[in-house]
Amino acid sequence: MKRDWELIRKILFKLALTSLDNGGIKGFPPAVVEYHYLLLKQSQLIDSQHKLTWQGHEFLDKIRNDTAWNKIKQTIKTKGIDLSFEAITLAGKSLLIALLAK
């Protein structure tokens, strides 16, 4: 199964507000959501109680804003790089640095 970054983002948004059961993302099959929960746990973005960790909050802050998220995705795509956790994190940091330098 392939990672769905839009689903991951939706899960993180929901968990920032409240805990959620594995089947709780509208429009996605429960098995797909459950798989993405597992990925988020493995990457230590959420804990075993489906709550965001510090790292999860930090990552969500990089991708929370729709404009920033779209710019991050576009930057990665333009460079011909696969959308990965590391690429998203680095592009988010680069965007923040560029905004702060203005």
Image: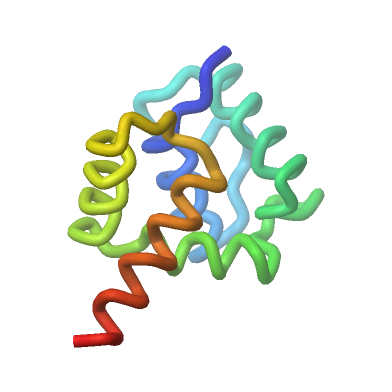
Task: In this rendered view, identify the residue nearer to me: 59 or 15.
Answer: 59
**Quadrant of residue 102 in the image?**
bottom left
User: In this rendering, would 41 be left or right of 18?
Assistant: right
**Residue 83 placed where, x, y %?**
43, 34
Residue 91 screen position, x and y as percent: 39, 56
**Residue 82 percent coordinates (x, y):** 43, 29
Q: What quarter of the picture does the N terminus occupy?
A: top right
Q: Foreground: 73 or 17? A: 73
Which residue is located at x 53 percent, y 61 percent? 59
Is residue 25 among what the camera can see? no
Dividing the picture into quadrants, the one containing residue 94 is bottom left
38 vs 82, left or right, is right
Q: Residue at x 23, y 57 (%)?
A: 66
Front-lying residue, 64 or 19: 64
Residue plotted at (22% across, 42% down)? 74
Task: Tell me, yes or no, if residue 67 can be seen here.
Answer: yes
Give the percent coordinates (x, y) of residue 37. 65, 36
